[in-house]
Image (cartoon, rainbow, N blue to C red):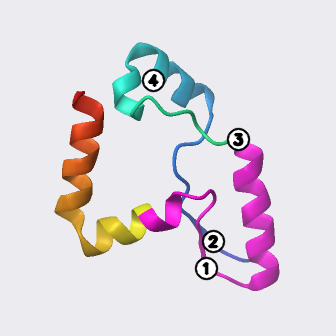
Amino acid sequence: MKIRCVCPSQVDTPQFRRIAAEDPSVVAHRSGMPAGLVLDEIERSLARDELFVFPGATARPAIRAKRFVPRLLQRTLSHMTSG
């Protein structure tokens, strides 16, 4: 058994679409990535024997920003959702 920590950005799921329909500002007016893309990245990680999987172009930078400059990311996201 192999364990992976999958850290995607927004994923296009029924729950995501419902939340986006109710209040687009919650998801910063963005669309979610296809779930198949997440699964493809998980499969590739098995060959590379990596613990963390960051599908999509924005996941890894977002995690790093949150880790190293958490207040900056919070202010940026707040600004994106408020206006």
Residue 5: horizontal and vertical position, in percent?
A: 56, 69
Contact (CB < 8 A) between labels 4 and 2?
no
> Which region shows up in magenta?
34-61
Say which element carries label 1: loop
Which of the two discs, 4 and 2, labels the residue nearer the N terminus? Answer: 2
Residue occupying the point 48% across, 15% down: 21
Task: Give me the C-alpha separation between circle 1 and circle 4.
Answer: 30 Å
Residue occupying the point 61% across, 79% down: 51
Task: Give me the C-alpha separation between circle 2 and circle 1.
Answer: 5 Å
Question: What is the three-letter code of the residue carrying label 2?
Answer: Arg
Say which element carries label 2: loop
**Mark 4 lies on residue:** 19
Which of the two discs, 1 and 4, labels the residue nearer the N terminus? Answer: 4
Say which element carries label 3: loop
**Mark 3 lies on residue:** 34
**Depth-wise, is mark 4 or mark 2 nearer the camera?**
4
Residue 57: horizontal and vertical position, in percent?
A: 59, 59
Residue 51 is marked as 1
Task: Give me the C-alpha separation between circle 4 and circle 2.
Answer: 27 Å
The one nearer the camera, 80 or 11, is 80
Task: Give me the C-alpha separation between circle 3 and circle 1.
Answer: 21 Å
Residue 47: horizontal and vertical position, in percent?
A: 82, 80
The one nearer the camera, 79 or 15, is 79
Which of the two discs, 2 and 1, labels the residue nearer the N terminus? Answer: 2
Task: Give me the C-alpha separation between circle 4 and circle 3.
Answer: 16 Å
Q: Is residue 15 left or right of residue 80?
A: right
Position of the C terminus by quadrant: top left
Contact (CB < 8 A) between labels 2 and 1?
yes
